[in-house]
Image (tube, rainbow, N blue to C red):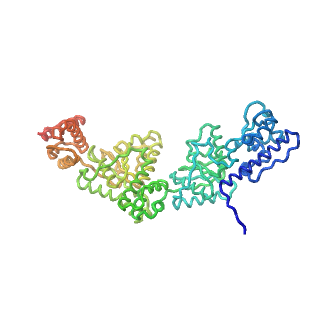
Amino acid sequence: MTVTMQTTPEMELALLREGLEATIGSVRARLSSLAEGTAPPPFAVSKESALLRLASIFRLTEVEQELLILAVAVELDGATAAVVQALGGREVCDVSVAERLVGPAIWDALVPEAPLRRWRLLELGGAGPLWQRSLRADERIVHALLGTMYLDQRLEGMVRPVWADGVVSARERDLAERLTQAWRGVARPPVILLGGRDAAAKQALAAAAAARLGMGLYRVAAVDIPGDWAQRYALAIFLDRELALSSAAVLIEGAAGAFADLISGPTILAADDPDLPERQPVLRLDLAEADRRERRDLWQQALGPWGEAALLDRVAAQFALPPSAIRAAAAEVEPGMEPEALTGRLWQAARLQGRRALDGLADRIESRAGWRDLVLPEDQLSVLKDLAGHLRDAWVVNQEWGWEGKSPRGLGAAALFAGPSGTGKTLAAEVLAGELALDLYRIDLSQVVSKYIGETEKNLSRIFEAAEDGGAILLFDEADALFGKRSEVKDSHDRYANVEVSYLLQRMEAYSGLAILTTNQKGAVDTAFLRRLRYVLNFPFPDAAARAEIWARIFPDETPLDGVRPDALAALNIAGGAIRSIALNAAYLAAGAGEPVRMGHVLRAARREYTKLEKPFTSAEMGAFR
């Protein structure tokens, strides 16, 4: 009966170190023979030593292997260091002692382009003639020979490990398999150009492919690569060496084709549209964004049996989240939650994950308004509720009922809200956001529009791409400056102004969520632009009945009132925005006096508001306070 003993990592490490000790002993014996004036025995490398692996990786000759072990032995073995000092008169091993040991072949082994120095396995220390320079083994290489693996400290902060998390879509799995096949069993793995917008998904794909090949994966951001040539080259050498020592690949994120040319190990260039490096061969793979069905599968994977079918359909349709964000959102769900609590928790978690990319590009408006806060004619309210239904059921119509498969163009819900200031345009957007439990972002067009050609489109593209993840409602407030009558093209600037408007409308039409433009002057908007909007909603100046209704609803239930008469205050010929400002200021005046809000407080607040608006009180308006 044959018994096979299983080796443990501790046993393997002990064997490596025994092999290194035996190899160092061979060098020490050869040095001792030199000191005694006898013929040295042949250099022998233990079969258990990690030197054999390093020699294979870096293609070291026997002379180069002995030089490396000689330098390592001086660092680790006191007996060897003593023999070296006896031969050279110094505590370090200099080139003259090494030449006596290995002969004139040392000069070929120590040229800068030979493996020992090209890969920074050895460094020549000190100054003066070459024969007096010292041989120092690189610390990372010493530890590699000892069997200790870690990320080189010179790479920390710029190079980060990436771990496979197992949450990938079917499309990502297919691409990971193609990458695996391209790298498996080839002497020169091709550089992989990995295109696509979703950085997290590309990381997951690359990590999955590396794991299939039994490799690790490191990530480098192009923005962290030094601009100085010497520093950039040193980074490439240490990174390339680390890939070889750790059996890993590198994922370079951003425009860094020239840096990839300095690396020989397995390399992936990831960007929206990656640079084409000079290094060959090259394989281009493009990661298209996951569709609703793929996202639904990812949610089901992450949630397991706790995911309800109808809820997953809605969440997957509304939030175009990458796998890492889906996993993070799903982690908020606790096993055994009630269906209603599960729905609310999961929706809010997905919403929080989706807003991360957009928070730095636009101002998020916290929406607490409801339909009760909005006073509009019935026709306008009906259109708004239809718009809310459009957004709520978009996934059913577009995906389940096949409209997206027939033609994905023009399925967005672009809208124009037109009307005087203070008539409720922004409030209506808040109501929609609250009704649908979605984020609302206001975009300041003055910060988006640029005088430099192409910059406006880039700014808009970043906003819409970031908004897709969370399906947020985008509010382009006061768009009059951009959406004027189509100008006669007299020069390139006129032509480009029209291009900017057309580009924005195109992105609004293609956006899967709701994009709203507001304007105070609908008549200034070109009718050619209006035809491209799904909804055009007019917000009229409120009549007396509407103003009375606004006054009746404007104060919160908690605010104490005494004698405030909404019907009388309807005589104030102002819009809802001004009414809110007056009501809020009246509340502060009453609170300061320690009283409930009375008509006198409203009068004082109204006078201030009219002064701000440069609007005189009419006799009819003053009659409201008599």
> In the visual, does 225 lie left or right of 584?
right
Q: Position of residue 184 (x, y in %)?
A: 65, 58
Task: Please state, as top left, top right, bottom left or bottom right, where the N terminus lies in the image.
Answer: bottom right
Task: Please state, as top left, top right, bottom left or bottom right, where the C terminus lies in the image.
Answer: top left
Is residue 554 among the parts visible in the rendering?
no
Based on the displayed image, in which of its 4 quarters is residue 99 positioned?
top right
Q: Residue furthest top?
A: 128
Is residue 145 among the parts visible in the rendering?
yes
> In the visual, does 320 lie left or right of 557?
right
Based on the displayed image, in which of its 4 quarters is residue 74 positioned?
top right
| Residue 83 vertical placement versus 181 (above, below) | above
* Front position in the image: 3 or 617: 3
* Front position in the image: 449 or 84: 84
Q: Residue furthest bottom?
A: 1
Callout count: 0
Q: Position of residue 52 (x, y in %)?
A: 74, 51
* Front position in the image: 81 or 333: 81
Q: Position of residue 596 (x, y in %)?
A: 18, 41
Q: Position of residue 562 (x, y in %)?
A: 15, 43
Q: Residue furthest left?
A: 626
> In the visual, does 28 lie left or right of 323?
right
